[in-house]
Amino acid sequence: MRLQDKAILITGSTTGIGEAIARRAIAEGAKVLVHGRDAKRGRALVAELGDRAVLHVDDIADPAAPARMVAAAVAAFGKLDTLVNNAASVERSNLATTDLALFDKIIAINLRAPLLLIKAAAPHLKASQGAVLNIGSVNGFCGEPNLLAYSISKGGLMTLSRNLADAMGRDRVRVNHFNVGWVLTANEYEVKIADGLPRDWPDRLDPATAPAGRLIKPEEIAAAAVYWMGDESRPISGTVLELNQYPVIGRNPPKETK
């Protein structure tokens, strides 16, 4: 049990990568505050995970939500060892379509909420000499043309991770960061259908996009997260780790075909 008795708050954990991390954390002995906006789905997941999982339904776009979420975790478990900032809004927008309302919404969810969650959690993480794991995206380096606001938010999250790793190190609080590549979640599957791809699109991937012949699974991100959520990674902090199928920076993909 690599996370035995750790108290972990995972945002956006009723689906996708967050759900996979919650499931793996429970399997590794942790207690998990499961967070999401869909109460019905959350209750079903917590019932499946058992008595070491507690549900908190909240909208992290509300600036008061982070304090409520941290308070709920501490009330449920008596402490907080790890905060995983996973929740994010992946909304399509480019330069022409990114208006003020959309930009503010994306920043509020993807960047402001993680900042406020860390701020609310800081005293508890200092007491437990705990950890923060921020789930970012390879889009934080540049991003696709139709993910402008999202990419900006993930670039900001990467800087936040590095800044706070430096600032919180003397309090023995570690902050690390994943830049995740293309992951096949249930939501991503439906988004690509809405974008016009055929229903079997995961089986038609360009080798340049998915050299392994498939996309990354949420469970594979969760497996990597275990090390960074627990004590095995102590005292490492400030790491920004790409979880992708190929190098992000400087890549020149092979031109040959099979």
Image (tube, rainbow, N blue to C red):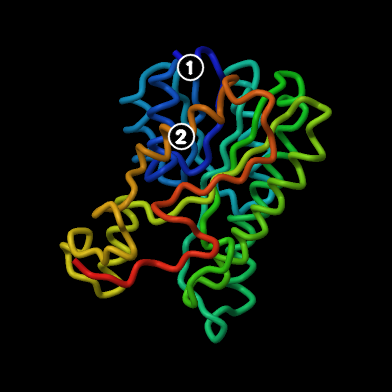
Judging depth in this view, the residue of 3 and 114 nearest the camera is: 3
Give the quadrant of residue 125.
Answer: top right
Q: Amino acid at mark 2?
A: Ala
Judging depth in this view, the residue of 142 and 6 nearest the camera is: 142
Earlier residue among tags 2 and 1: 1
Q: Are marks 2 and 1 in contact (CB under 8 Å)?
A: no
- Identify the residue shown where x is 59% and y is 37%: 133
Distance, label 2 to label 1, CA atoms, is 12 Å
* Residue closest to the far bottom: 96
SS of the residue under disc 1: loop
Q: Amino acid at mark 1?
A: Arg
Task: Classify 111 as above or below 54.
Answer: below
Residue 157 position within the rendered picture, expressed as x and y whole percent measured from the top left:
65, 53
Give the quadrant of residue 95.
Answer: bottom right
Instruction: Give the quadrant of the C terminus.
Output: bottom left
Residue 217 position within the rendered picture, expressed as x and y whole percent measured from the top left:
32, 44
The label shown at residue 32 is: none
- Identify the residue shown where x is 28% and y is 58%: 189
Task: Classify 213 as above or below 18.
Answer: below
Task: Classify 183 as above or below 164.
Answer: below
Which residue lies under the disc numbered 1? 2
Residue 146 position within the rendered picture, expressed as x and y whole percent measured from the top left:
47, 76
Residue 105 position within the rendered picture, expressed as x and y whole percent measured from the top left:
59, 64
The label shown at residue 224 is: 2
Label 2 environment density (alpha carbons within 10 Å; few <14, some 14–19, many ≥20): few
Residue 104 left/right relative to 196: right
Residue 256 left/right relative to 179: left
- Identify the residue shown where x is 57% and y is 20%: 232
Residue 42 left/right relative to 88: left
Instruction: Give the quadrant of the N terminus.
Output: top left
- Identify the residue shown where x is 45% and y is 25%: 25
SS of the residue under disc 2: helix
